[in-house]
Image (tube, rainbow, N blue to C red):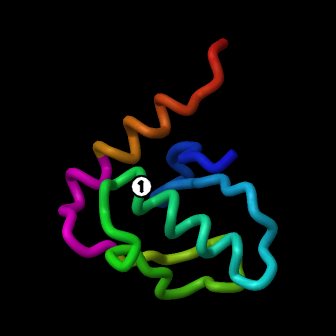
């Protein structure tokens, strides 16, 4: 299951189900972020780290404060109950 896991230093950690082959994991990251942030998929792009676990993404149509809020909400909603 793909989900926003939470903060990892200054970055956000996400988990996606597809294996990192033929761009499937990258596509899943884009889809997860687009859905979580209510952005069109073409508003989310991976700008570096295509073949790495660490990626830099560009987001169009959303400000940093709203991005932080929505990712934090998604992270909290996806936590396993203790």
Between residues 18 and 47, which one lies in front from this camera angle? 18
On the image, which quarter does residue 18 sit in? Answer: bottom right
Q: Which residues are magenta?
A: 59-68
Q: How many numbered dots are placed on residues in this image?
A: 1
In the rendered view, tell whether residue 4 sits above or below residue 19.
above
Residue 82 screen position, x and y as percent: 66, 12
Residue drawn at x 29%, y 55% as measured from the top left: 67
Residue drawn at x 48%, y 29% as measured from the top left: 77
Between residues 13 and 17, which one lies in front from this camera angle? 17
Left or right: where 79 falls relative to 10: right
In the rendered view, tell whether residue 67 sits above or below residue 5.
below
Residue 37 screen position, x and y as percent: 34, 54
Residue drawn at x 32%, y 73% as measured from the top left: 59
On the image, which quarter does residue 38 sit in? Answer: bottom left
Residue at label 1? 35
Residue 41 screen position, x and y as percent: 40, 72
């Amino acid at each position: 299951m793909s989900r926003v896991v939470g903060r990892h230093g200054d970055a956000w950690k996400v988990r996606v189900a597809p294996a990192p082959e033929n761009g499937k994991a990258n596509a899943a990251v884009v889809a997860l972020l687009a859905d979580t942030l209510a952005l069109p998929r073409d508003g989310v792009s991976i700008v570096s780290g295509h073949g790495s676990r660490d990626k830099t993404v560009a987001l169009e149509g959303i400000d940093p404060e709203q991005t932080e809020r929505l990712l934090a909400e998604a992270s909290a909603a996806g936590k396993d109950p203790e």
